[in-house]
Amino acid sequence: MFINEYYTPNLHKERKQIIAAYLRVSTDRQTTLNQKSEILNFCKRQELKINVWCKETVSGTKKEDERKLGVLLDKLQQGDILIITEVSRLSRKLINIMNIIHQSIEKGITIHSIKEGYKFDSSINSQVLAFAFGLCAEIERTLISQRTREALARRRAAGMKLGRPKGSLCSCKLYEHMEDIKILRTKGYSYQKIAHKYKVAPETVRLFYIRHIGNR
């Protein structure tokens, strides 16, 4: 059974270890059944018992603090365990994955990623693996930044103006409808109604009308 409430420690009793499973899919068309099955099989082999299930349907590009995952990570403490089927369940961005792993290790949380066979904890091997992830994330971020700068430099060298002139694309769409827009305004249609008809902003219609048809 999937639960939304997380264990709250009793001040008069020793806190119970949390063994959590996190399952994520990107769309409602996908199912978490395969992930759940893999996790249950893993727990059977490792003699672990899940006491918190966290399931959500959300894009992996969102940061963890914008997802249920963020709430779960805040609840986990030293000695707790988080189980996932693969690291991409945590995020689609390597830098976010690295941040989650690093913060979890610092808190004393163990993360098991089943498909890759990774175990992230306070051991030397895990720290080396986490360092490798961090290095990859840094390289990825540097390459993206470098590709962006190079693309902008090529455009400048070619004499191209960077960015799109305000309203240029939308205004261009309205030229072929100039006579229709003129008639609609004559009939008393508001800029908002005309904008809705041609799928542009009302301010775009207003400026187009003033500049090319005449303010009436």
Image (cartoon, rainbow, N blue to C red):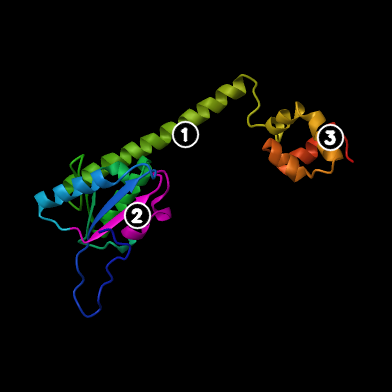
Tell me where residue 26 appears, x and y as whole percent. 38, 43
Identify the residue position indicated by label 2 in the image.
69
Identify the residue position indicated by label 1 in the image.
145
> Which amino acid, mark 2?
Leu
Tell me where residue 10 appears, x and y as whole percent. 25, 76
Tell me where residue 8 appears, x and y as whole percent. 28, 71
Is the N terminus in the top left, top right, bottom left or bottom right quadrant?
bottom left
Q: At 21% across and 61% down in the image, what residue appears?
A: 51
Quadrant of the image occupied by residue 14:
bottom left
Q: Earlier in the sequence, mark 2 or mark 1?
A: 2
Q: Nearer the viewer, residue 170 or 87?
A: 170
> Which amino acid, mark 3?
Ile
Q: Earlier in the sequence, mark 3 or mark 2?
A: 2
Is the C terminus in the top left, top right, bottom left or bottom right quadrant?
top right
Identify the residue position indicated by label 3 in the image.
183
> Which amino acid, mark 1?
Ser
**Crowd class of label 2 (few under 14; some 14 to 19; many from 20; radius 10 Å):** many
Residue 20: image tag: none
Mark in front: 2 vs 1: 2
